[in-house]
């Protein structure tokens, strides 16, 4: 198991959301402090505030991409197109590995509660969800990206 995969999975096990766990694993690369990473990613957990939309682990992977190679110039159309193509490649890879980039589709067989209150992190919680493995795969995807860019 890669160091980043293990680190991200450990953060998730500690109680951080899927998005926080992935972004926290890459603080050294992004230059974010742990507090900054946790705060930035916090709203994206549970598929964006438990709305079960885009998976938080995938969202955090895109945050890492943006911090490292984001497009800052509003008129650089080629850079935007290249970035969007990279996002689409990552989405395809993520979907191939996990089945979807949408949280509710990833959790389709898991009983979940509605509302804004997160469920208690129990052994049953971790055993029922694919989230731990998804967090790990998102970290591996970022690691592959980092190796390819160097």
Image: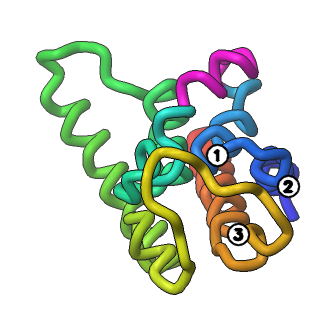
Look at mark 2 in the image and give the residue it sits on: 6
Coloring basis for residues: rainbow
Is residue 14 shown to the viewer in this render? Answer: yes
Closest to the camera, between mark 1 and mark 3, is: 1
Look at mark 3 in the image and give the residue it sits on: 133
The residue located at (75%, 39%) in the rendering is 25
The residue located at (71%, 61%) in the rendering is 136
Quote the CA–CA distance across marks 1 and 2: 15 Å
Is residue 61 shown to the viewer in this render? Answer: no
Q: Find numbered disc 3 in the image and state the secondary structure of the residue it sits on.
A: helix
Q: Find numbered disc 2 in the image and state the secondary structure of the residue it sits on.
A: helix
Which badge, 2 or 3, is on the more N-terminal residue? 2
Residue 138 colored magenta? no
Within 10 Å of disc 2 (Cα), the crowding (few <14, some 14-19, many 20+) is some
Q: Nearer the viewer, residue 144 or 31?
A: 31
Q: Which of 69 and 103 is in front in this view?
A: 103
Number of disc labels:
3
Residue 2: x and y in percent read 84, 58
Residue 143: x and y in percent read 68, 50
Q: Which quarter of the picture shows residue 39? A: top right
Q: Quadrant of the N terminus?
A: bottom right
Residue 75: x and y in percent read 12, 17
Highlighted magenta segment, given as a residue range: 30-41
Look at mark 1 in the image and give the residue it sits on: 17
Q: Quadrant of the C terminus?
A: top right
């Amino acid at each position: 198991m890669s160091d980043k995969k293990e680190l991200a999975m450990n953060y998730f096990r500690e109680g951080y959301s899927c998005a926080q766990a992935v972004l926290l694993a890459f603080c050294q690369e992004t230059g974010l402090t742990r507090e900054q990473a946790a705060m930035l990613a916090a709203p994206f957990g549970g598929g964006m505030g438990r709305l079960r939309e885009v998976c938080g682990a995938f969202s955090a992977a895109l945050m890492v991409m943006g911090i490292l190679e984001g497009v800052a110039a509003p008129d650089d159309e080629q850079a935007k197109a290249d970035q969007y193509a990279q996002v689409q490649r990552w989405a395809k890879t993520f979907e191939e590995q996990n089945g979807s980039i949408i949280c509710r589709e990833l959790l389709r067989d898991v009983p979940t509660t509605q509302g804004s209150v997160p469920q208690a992190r129990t052994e049953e919680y971790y055993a029922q969800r694919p989230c731990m493995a998804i967090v790990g795969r998102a970290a591996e995807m970022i690691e592959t990206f980092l190796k390819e860019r160097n």
